[in-house]
Amino acid sequence: MHEFSTAVGVVETVLDVARQNNAIKVKKIELVVGEFTMLNDDQLKFSFEIASEGTIAEGAEVIIKKQKGEIECLDCQYKGEIADREKKEELDHFVVDLVNIFECPKCHSNRTKISGGRDIYVNNIEIELEDES
Ligand SMILES: [Zn+2]
């Protein structure tokens, strides 16, 4: 499951930051998830719960912010969102590494590449420190 391995990575990142800051508990995590990562929010949250079990990040609130996917046209240099929403739904069944799957909304060329929204990262972490009451 794609979501689970991602969640494990997220937990590791979060625990690293928490340790560096002498946290005793992680209260809240804000994740930025690119549209083209094809990660399911609910599955990601669920996977996080499992992956964080027994760590100080267990029970942390997970906020997911979506980042819009972006393509770049090799013909007209258009850069921005895709217009073909239907195609995007279909994407779930494809490997995201495929190129030339989106049509440029400006010149309708198929020579496009994905230029944004393929990443997932931890944007913000709220922790509880030892000397906090
Ligand atoms: Zn174009």
Image: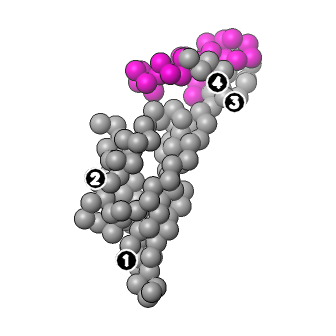
- Residue highlighted by disc 1: 24
Is there a contact, CB below 8 Å, between mark 4 and mark 1?
Answer: no
Q: Nearer the viewer, mark 2 or mark 3?
A: 2
Residue segment shown in magenta: 87-116
Q: Position of residue 52 (x, y in %)?
A: 31, 59
**124 shown above or below 64:** below
Could you give the CA–CA distance between mark 4 and mark 1, rounded to whole angstroms?
A: 43 Å
The one nearer the camera, 62 or 99, is 62
Report if residue 18 lies within the magenta region: no
Could you give the CA–CA distance between mark 4 and mark 3, rounded to whole angstroms?
A: 7 Å
Q: What residue is drawn where x is 55% and y is 47%?
A: 65
Q: Amino acid at mark 1?
A: Ile
- Residue highlighted by disc 4: 82
Could you give the CA–CA distance between mark 3 and mark 1, rounded to whole angstroms?
A: 42 Å
Q: Which mark is on residue 80?
A: 3
Say what secondary structure mark 3 lies in.
strand
Is there a contact, CB below 8 Å, between mark 1 and mark 2?
Answer: no
**Colouring style:** one colour
**45 shown above or below 104:** below
